[in-house]
Amino acid sequence: MRIAGLLSAVALGALALGAGQPQGRTPFQAKTLAFAFDHADHYPGVRLLEASRGADGHFHGRMTSDWYGTIPFDDATLSADGQTLAFETRNINAKEKTRPWTVTANAGGILLTGGIWHSNLHQSGRPATAAEVKRLAFHPVPLPPFRALAPDGQAKTPPMGWSSWNKFADHIDDKTIRAMADAMVSSGLRDAGYVYINIDDGWQGTRGPDGSLRPNARFPDMKALADYVHARGLKLGIYSSPGPRTCAGYEGSYGHVAQDAKTFAAWGIDYLKYDLCSGEWFYDNRDTVVRSYAEMGAALRASGRSMLFSLCEYGRFDVGSWGRSVGGHLWRTTGDITDTYADMAKNGFDHNGKPGDAGPGGWNDPDMLEVGNGGMSDDEYRTHMTLWAMSAAPLLMGHDLRLTSEATKRILTNREVIAIDQDARGVQAQALRKGDGTEIWVKPLADGRRAIALFNRGTSAATLRFTPQDAGLTRFASLRDVWNARALPESTAELAVPAHGTVLLVASGR
Ligand code: GLA
């Protein structure tokens, strides 16, 4: 018995390896198959593959993944030698709408190759037991119907603070966040108006038996951290995703939206950035993206604590036109900024949202500041700050606050520049002239004055001409050069602007 059993196992192994194998002895001969992956690639984390053969002889099935839940496939065809199943799946990369996959028989089970987004995957699977199939199954959760939310009176001016992402990515911990809160106060940045300390991606651990989300070991006690931040006159922000995984691969809120909102409220959180990330697999059209944000917006309102709601879906589906209706107070208008002039300028000049969408209660967000991170010159950082202030954009610093140089502090704490950003009228500047690498923007202020920004996007100095009429005035009664803190003659009609630089004026007149 034993010997016979051993022999047949060896024989099957040899057959699975290929050569001269009669059809009918590969895993693909079975009508249904299920394979588990013990060492799944982190992205997208395919844990299970199931398939069954239809009457047409083709296989239909699905993979179950950490990031995207169920990844279905249809019409998988078997190669002539019966060893390889090939199919295509939908992709989330506009350049490659579908991606090819193969499942090849090997001694222990199968080798799975394929890819999603821009990444490629290669991993070995073994037969899964029925219990594993049950345990690894993904449970889709439907979205509630859309219900518009009324404004809640928060964010009358653009939010100001700091976020961990640009400098630290997910290398963050409780100690660093506390140090940032301390530095916010000691540097004078808090008193200049920066009050939010926002923990971006990388704080999440796993879910407890009741499904509640726990921080990872780097954040031993979120409530204590919130108390620490609050005791310094600051507010604490946190980060999640409507998908199962955040962009850095941490636990997202999929299937736990109301529960997570309650958890954040119980910790004393004041701000949530909600980043689409793996949610883009599930929510890939306007209706579902809106509903997924509306679900969290409503959950925050029901949580019993006032929290700012920051929408991060990279400006898709004209977010500025519906951001307020889902309870959003700010919404990203574009992809991620980097600490380079080119990327900053792309976001700040060209992807800063529609001026008509911004105003008290809801703001276009061209992403967080890079000022102080070292990748740009002071002229370029002044342009960065000016663009954000003229756009009435959120001012969320992104550098190590402990290392704020005097030059950086002068840019970030210029009270006149901050006043333009925070102006109570909340109007986002319009670009009234663009050409030859120069732009003139005008922002009307609550007291009737006009902020006028002269931008030089070129790589050599330029002279920009302007008139009171550009700012909707017949003549200037006063003209102030904000960055240089000096009055200019009312007759000034042109000014030199350095390469990649800016002159920021505030004018009064009739
Ligand atoms: C996305 C966002 C970033 C940051 C990271 C975190 O890329 O756009 O701002 O939050 O995710 O993983």
Image (cartoon, rainbow, N blue to C red):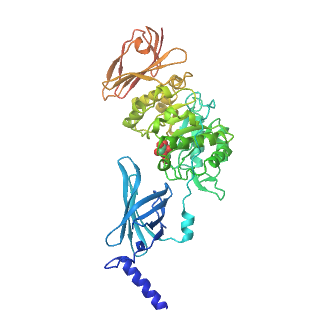
User: Along the line of sight, which residue is nearer the eye, 139 or 124?
Assistant: 139
Residue 50 image position (x, y, % from top left): 47, 65
Q: Judge left or right: residue 94 versus residue 326.
A: left
Would you place residue 254 above or below residue 77 in this image? above
Would you place residue 257 above or below residue 446 in this image? below
Residue 419, image quadrant: top right
User: Along the line of sight, which residue is nearer the eye, 421 or 314?
Assistant: 314
Query: Looking at the image, which residue is at 59% across and 48% down?
Result: 175
Residue reaching furthest front? Answer: 55
Would you place residue 463 above or below residue 344 in this image? above
Q: How many marks?
A: 0
Query: Looking at the image, which residue is at 39% across and 31% down?
Result: 350
User: Along the line of sight, which residue is nearer the eye, 208 or 396?
Assistant: 208
Residue 204 image position (x, y, % from top left): 57, 52
Residue 127 image position (x, y, % from top left): 48, 72
Would you place residue 380 above or below residue 132 in this image? above
Q: Judge left or right: residue 443 versus residue 251.
A: left
Residue 310, image quadrant: top right
Residue 146, image quadrant: top right
User: Along the line of sight, which residue is nearer the eye, 105 or 59?
Assistant: 59
Query: From this viewpoint, is residue 377 visible?
Result: no
Residue 302 image position (x, y, % from top left): 67, 41
Q: Judge left or right: residue 173 versus residue 486.
A: right
Query: From this viewpoint, is residue 205 visible?
Result: yes
